[in-house]
Image (tube, rainbow, N blue to C red):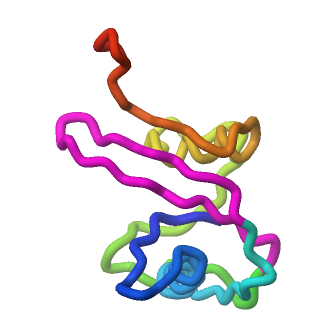
Amino acid sequence: MWGRTCPKAGEPLDRAARREAMEKTGVRISADQQDFRGLVHHHEPGEGMARITAVFVAQSCTGEPHNAEPDKHEGLFWAPMEKPPPDCHPCTAAIFHMLTHGPSYRALNWLTSGGAR
């Protein structure tokens, strides 16, 4: 399970990921159930905005996953990481690829020195 996490002031990334999992899906993840898997440095084309996404996975959790924020999200569904749905966000697809094939860092949508992505 994964999600974009924005830490609150004074909150480390791992704790923010656990808090966001609870807020978005209603599941509780303890620190010992959570593993850090890598970083994605994502550049949003056209916006000029860059994000660094810390990727954590949970081997188990407590509670039944559900869409705990229906006012913000359309739903919750499972998808195979090896074959994400066609409308999967590019950052999510990159995370799935990173988790199944490596490496533990990916730069996404950055211009190379020659001007190509």
* Vertical order, 10 against 73 (above or below): below
Based on the picture, tell me whether residue 46 belongs to the magenta stretch: yes
The quarter holding residue 93 reads: top right
Based on the picture, tell me whether residue 98 belongs to the magenta stretch: no
* Vertical order, 52 against 106 (above or below): below
Secondary structure mostly taken by the magenta-highlighted segment of the chain? strand
The residue located at (42%, 87%) in the rendering is: 10
Q: Is residue 11 left or right of residue 65?
A: left
Looking at the rendered image, the quarter that the C terminus falls into is top left
From the viewer's side, name the closer residue of 79 and 61: 61
Looking at the rendered image, the quarter that the N terminus falls into is bottom right
The residue located at (24%, 47%) in the rendering is: 49
Residue 17, given in percent of the width and then of the height, sits at 55, 76
The answer to whether residue 66 is seen in the rendering is no
The quarter holding residue 47 reads: top left
From the viewer's side, name the closer residue of 85 and 109: 109
The residue located at (75%, 68%) in the rendering is: 35
Which residues are the magenta region? 36-60
Residue extending farthest left: 47
